[in-house]
């Protein structure tokens, strides 16, 4: 049974009397989600996670959507300080200082397969990059896997056809490195806060940088008339089920095991929801008359290479140092491409979750994961 609907309705009302009460003895977990209730990560990813983690009655989740618990500026710090026990965090700028200065945010942009890339990032961080976990622990966070959206484009009420079309434009940005890209194009990156549809309607932003899957939201589809298609990367380094390190320390091994077991289901549900949302969005675009348009060649030239800065290496490189670091990620990406391809178009949440469990989560120690990296 899918319980995401009533759970999210309760979250939107926050303290309303209709919010389902926790079972007797259940540990209540507050979750900050700077996303709308209709977002694939919330409605499907967190819906599946909650169903799995609440199954035996030891947990009860309170989901605060649209960032209503911590606001737009305290997403990371509020989680680190324990003002929320879990939440969604965007890690494109974090952790800094991974081996050979190759940042996960830059690395995460490469590769054509969003779902394989997210799985590769999950395994890479959780099993192969101790410095990544240590950097996250220093920020007070525990990483429970990554999801991925589809390729990013520019969504706007009007066409973005000129070479200087983004000059001064306020664009909702998911964060670094897209902030840098927008500045390169003379735009003004704006952190998304609350409803993107409302921000467009009220004139607080001029465009949204994101996947077409966002247009599955009818309110946003009513505001957007043009999708400017150009290479703007793939987003696969967010942490939808981040946990506060302080909260994680309070859990018994069995409780940590329950959350780690729920994570693959949530990651799989979010990934497949994005795929379905992308297909639905294309249908919505057709019905609403939203057109794809080509970016001006000068705009394309200006954006070229934004995901290949000084800290980025070619993923097919071999050898020592940074090249070997990136090649390891590439091998994981190829492994998951093959594993998911075997399932074909009928890949289910259960099948994807089983692969993630077998390849990653079953290899973790519930006694030490997230805690060992936090040791001085």
Image (cartoon, rainbow, N blue to C red):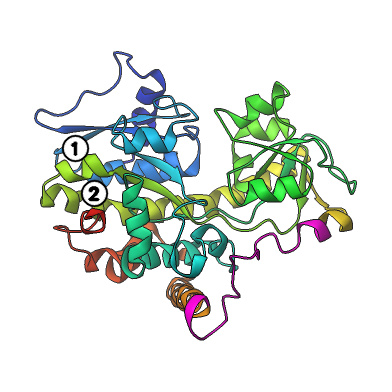
Magenta range is 300-322
The numbered disc on residue 349 is: none
Give the residue displayed 83% in from the left and 40% down from the top.
167
Confirm or deny contact between disc 1 and disc 2 (CB under 8 A).
yes
The numbered disc on residue 59 is: 1
Report the predominant secondary structure element of the magenta stretch.
loop
Residue 334 in sight in this render = no
Q: Nearer the viewer, residue 38 or 95?
A: 95
Residue 221 in sight in this render = yes
Asked if the magenta segment contains residue 309, the reply would be yes
Question: Looking at the picture, how far across and down is residue 27, in whole percent?
Answer: 16, 33
Specify the farthest residue to the top: 17
Specify the farthest residue to the front: 376
Mark 2 secondary-structure assignment: helix
Asked if the magenta segment contains residue 326, the reply would be no
Left or right: 243 in relation to 146: left
Residue under label 2: 259
Left or right: 132 in relation to 92: left
Does 87 sit above or below residue 101?
A: above
Q: Nearer the viewer, residue 11 or 6?
A: 11
C-alpha gap between disc 1 and disc 2: 9 Å
């Amino acid at each position: 049974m899918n319980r995401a609907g009533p759970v999210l309705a309760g979250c939107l009302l926050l303290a309303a009397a209709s919010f389902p009460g926790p079972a007797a003895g259940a540990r209540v977990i507050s979750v900050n989600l700077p996303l709308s209730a209709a977002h694939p990560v919330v409605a499907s990813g967190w819906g599946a996670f909650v169903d799995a983690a609440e199954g035996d009655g030891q947990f009860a989740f309170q989901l605060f959507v649209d960032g209503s618990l911590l606001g737009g500026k305290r997403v990371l710090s509020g989680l680190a300080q324990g003002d929320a026990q879990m939440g969604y965090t965007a890690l494109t700028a974090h952790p800094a200082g991974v081996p050979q200065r190759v940042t996960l945010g830059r690395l995460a942009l490469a590769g054509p397969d969003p779902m394989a890339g997210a799985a590769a990032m999950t395994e890479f961080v959780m099993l192969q990059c101790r410095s990544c976990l240590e950097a996250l622990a220093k920020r007070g966070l525990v990483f429970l896997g990554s999801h991925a959206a589809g390729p990013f484009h520019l969504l706007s009420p009007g066409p973005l056809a000129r070479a200087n079309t983004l000059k001064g434009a306020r664009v909702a940005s998911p964060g670094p490195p897209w902030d840098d890209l927008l500045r390169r194009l003379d735009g003004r990156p704006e952190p998304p806060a609350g409803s993107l549809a409302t921000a467009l309607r009220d004139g607080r932003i001029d465009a949204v940088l994101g996947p077409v899957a966002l247009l599955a939201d009818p309110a946003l589809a009513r505001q957007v008339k043009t999708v400017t298609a150009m290479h703007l990367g793939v987003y696969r380094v967010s942490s939808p089920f981040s946990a506060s390190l302080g909260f994680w320390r309070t859990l018994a091994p069995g409780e940590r095991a329950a959350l780690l077991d729920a994570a693959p289901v949530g990651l799989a549900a979010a990934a497949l929801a994005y795929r379905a949302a992308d297909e639905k969005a294309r249908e919505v675009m057709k019905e609403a008359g939203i057109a794809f348009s080509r970016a001006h060649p000068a705009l394309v030239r200006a954006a070229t290479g934004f995901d290949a800065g000084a800290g980025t290496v070619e993923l097919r490189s071999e050898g020592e140092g940074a090249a070997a670091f990136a090649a390891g990620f590439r091998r994981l990406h190829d492994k998951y491409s093959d594993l998911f391809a075997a399932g074909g178009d009928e890949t289910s949440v259960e099948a994807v979750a089983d692969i993630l469990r077998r390849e990653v989560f079953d290899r973790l120690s519930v006694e030490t994961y997230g805690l060992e990296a936090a040791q001085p």
